[in-house]
Image (spheres, rainbow, N blue to C red):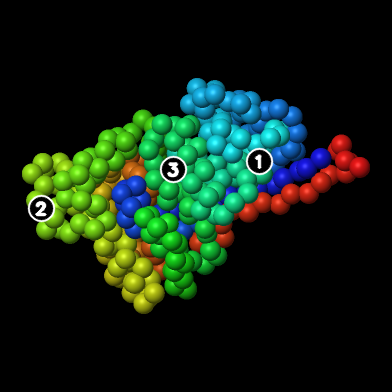
Amino acid sequence: MLTVRAFAPGRVNLIGDHTDYTGGWAMPMAVEWGTTVRVERRGSSVDLASSEKRRPARVPLDVPDPAAVQPAWARYVAGVVAVVRPAVGAVGTVSTTLPVGAGLSSSAALEVAVALALGFEGAPLDLALACQRAEHLASGVPSGLMDQLASVSGVDGHALLMDCLSFEVTPVPMPAGVDVVVVHSGQARALAGSAYGERRAQCEAAAEVIGPLREATVDDVARLDDPLLRRRARHVVTENRRVLDFADCLRNRDLAGAGALMVASHASLAGDFDVSTPALDALVAELSAVGGVYGARLTGAGFGGCVVALADGASPVRGWRLHPSAGARSHSDHDPGVGGQ
């Protein structure tokens, strides 16, 4: 019987939020924390028990509507089953070191690990696109590709400069002696109940007037008559520039410059995009005041979750110190002791 162990990392986004679904630029990194799925490939359904959840996922291979599956976490499994359409089911377990609802892409890590465990074959980009479709089916949130692409594309020791139009990923070395510190705000994040879809629609409305936001300038943004759309578009246009400048700062070890860009990014997400919260704002201010911290910002889509800071390795800043890590991988073998020859 075929047994498979698949691991997919979560990600922290250093800079570039709400730019992926407009075809812009982002700079995440895969982290050492992630989700592991261990299965035996057999049966006519996918049955997974989670160490984090009381109720298991039981998904038939012909699942008609992933969004209707219970419990809620099983919808992401169902979305993958609906997209991958494996010929054989699986029985096994899910475990994770990622905090759920923190904005570290626990759902994307689950999707990627399940897809690999179910035998997905294809290029990393194809895997990311399949898992993005699964997320859309499961949650109804029109999320971009950054989370899944970061999980499958991780490079040890490197951040990922991501072109969200071509989906080209360029690894950028993280400078030695610099830590990426993540701190939870205490405010759980749930995109399905947030204004994520509304923000995306507003960006699309702005693009209908001034053209693709990836190519727009600040002068183009100023032509928008609607002040709300003007603010939304201004964030995306200026954030794209900040991502490219941030990559240059890392290459040149300009850590003060990189930190200033993170602070400016948070101000834009809070002021122009309205996705920060008082808890996130207070945490960014607190971390930025600690010695050795170059800059901090909310990470992920906002509405709660975590703040990420760039800090000197000797800084006393509190939080999870995460490291840029390799991407998703799987291992399979035949177990002759269970149904084999």
Task: Please provide percent x and percent y for residue 139.
Answer: 44, 32
- Estimate the spatial distance between the alpha carbons at disc 1 and disc 2, rounded to whole Å: 49 Å
Tag nearer the camera, 2 or 3: 2
Task: Please provide percent x and percent y for residue 253.
Answer: 37, 75
Closer to the camera, 146 or 156? 146
Task: Please provide percent x and percent y for residue 273.
Answer: 23, 45
Which one is earlier in the sequence, the residue at label 2 or at label 3? 3
Q: Residue beneath label 3, please?
A: 102
Q: Amino acid at mark 2?
A: Ala
Q: Residue at x 48, y 32 (%)?
A: 138
Are there few (<14), some (14-19), or many (20+) residues within 10 Å of tag 1?
A: many
Q: Identify whether 82 is placed above or below 17.
A: above
- Estimate the spatial distance between the alpha carbons at disc 3 and disc 1, rounded to whole Å: 26 Å
Q: Residue beneath label 2, please?
A: 222
Q: Amino acid at mark 3?
A: Ala
The residue tagged with tag 2: helix, strand or loop? helix
The residue tagged with tag 3: helix, strand or loop? loop
Q: Residue at x 47, y 67 (%)?
A: 171
Which one is earlier in the sequence, the residue at label 1 or at label 2? 1
Task: Please provide percent x and percent y for residue 260.
Answer: 27, 64
Q: Residue at x 47, y 73 (%)?
A: 176
The label on residue 161 is: none
Count up the numbered dots. 3
Q: Is residue 13 visible?
A: yes
Among the 4 quarters of the image, the one containing residue 247: bottom left
Q: Residue beneath label 1, please?
A: 118
Please indicate whether residue 225 sits to the left or right of residue 167 in the image: left
Please indicate whether residue 127 sits to the left or right of residue 229 in the image: right
Are there few (<14), some (14-19), or many (20+) residues within 10 Å of tag 2?
A: some
Tag nearer the camera, 3 or 1: 1
Q: Residue at x 52, y 67 (%)?
A: 157
